[in-house]
Image: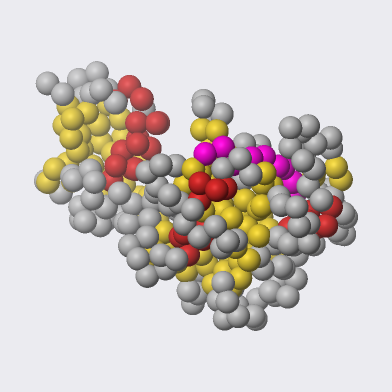
Amino acid sequence: MGCTKSNSKETYKEPEFTKHDEIHPPVPLNLIFEAIKSVCLIILNNRKQKSVGSGFFLNLSNTKKYLVTAGHIFAAATTESEINLQIYNNKIMKFNLINRDYLYFAEKIDILLIEMKDTDEIYNDVKFLYYDSNYEKEYGLYKNLYVFTIEHIFGENAACASGQIIDVQKYYEYEFTHTIPTDRGSSGCPIILLNNNINIIRVIGIHISKDIKKKVNFGIFIGEILKKENSKYLKKIKMSEDIEVRFELLLSDINISHTLICKLTDNFSSLESKLFYEFPELRNKVINFIANGNIINREGTLEQNKIEDQTSIYCLKIE
C-alpha cells in the first residue's frame, strides 16, 4: 500500500503515507493529491442489499464528462435505488440515474459511464481525468510499466497503491493484468500511469476484478473501449424494478421454497448461480427449471422467459 488518506467527517486532511513496496517506485505527492480529486466512493442501497465500489471522473471532451466505474457495482440498480457519491472533501452527492445519459459496456468489458452535469453540486470540486491515447492500439507497450490507483477498499477512506502491468491479454486487446493491491470496494478505480513526467496524470484503464486463487488483478484499457462508443460494446442501460421469484424444489430428499430478488433483465443463468450458491447440494440434482409450464432457457433473460414478479419456478430432477 503506497499511501492512505486519513480524514475526519468534518474536515479534509492530506493523505498519510506508509512505507512503499521497494519493488515499485514511489508515487509523487503531487500526483497523489491531484488523483484523489478524481476518485469517489460509490454507495448503492437497494431494498435488501448494499454495494460499495470506487469510481473516477473522466473528461472525454468539453461537452462529455462522465463518472466511470465497474458495471457490476450497478448490476442491482433500479430507478428507486439510493446512490451516494462521496468525494475527497467528504462532500456527498445523492445520485439519481433518472434523466441521465448512461452507457454500459457488454458483460465481458464491465464498464459503466454515467453523464455528469455542470449543475451537479460536486461538479466544480472534482478533477476530470484525461485518458492516455499515446499508445493507440499497441497496448503491448504498456506491459511492465508502473501504475498506481486511488481506491476505496471496503468502502473506507481513499487509499493509494502502486503496481505494475503484468500482461496484455492476447484474445481481448482491451484486457490486462496488474499487481496493484486491491480488495472489495476497489472495483471501478482508475489505473493511472506512473511516468517520469510527474506533472501529468493520464489514466490508462480501470480495475474490474481480482482472482484470489491466482493472486492477479484484471483491468480494462479505457482508451480502446471509448473508441467503440458506437459499437456492440456500448449500449444504453435498461433500468428495471426489482422483482421476487420463488424457487419450489420438491425432490425426494430435498424440500425447499426459496425467494430470490432479481431484475427482469437478469439472465436466468445468473439467478441459477445464486440459487446454487445458497444451496450447493442442488448443483448435481437439478436438470432443468420450469415456469408457467415451459422449460426455461437458461441463457435468456427473465423477461424473455416470461417470468414476472411472484412467479414460482419449479425444478426437474435428475432421474
Give the dominant element type of the magenta stretch: helix, strand or loop: strand
The stretch drawn in magenta includes residue 160 = yes
Q: Nearer the viewer, residue 57 or 258?
A: 57
Q: Residue at x 66, y 65 (%)?
A: 129
Q: Position of residue 44 (x, y in %)?
A: 57, 55
* Quadrant housing residue 313: top left
Instruction: Classify the position of the C terminus by image quarter.
Output: top left
Where on the picture, by quarter, is residue 274? top left
Left or right: 259 in relation to 301: right
Residue 29 point in image, percent of width and height: 84, 52
The one nearer the camera, 43 or 175, is 175
**Residue 12 colored in magenta in the image:** no
Colour mode of the rendering = secondary structure
Quadrant where the N terminus lies? top right
Q: How many marks?
A: 0
For the point 78% across and 32% down, the residue is 22
Q: Does the rendering let one see residue 241?
A: no
Q: Is residue 73 left or right of residue 249?
A: right
Looking at the image, residue 296 sits to the left or right of residue 193; the answer is left
Q: Nearer the viewer, residue 127 or 263?
A: 127
Identified at 41% across, 59% down, the residue is 105
Over which residues does the magenta segment extend? 156-167
| Nearer to us in this view, 269 or 307 | 269
Q: Measuring from the top left, give residue 123's x and y in whole percent.
A: 68, 74
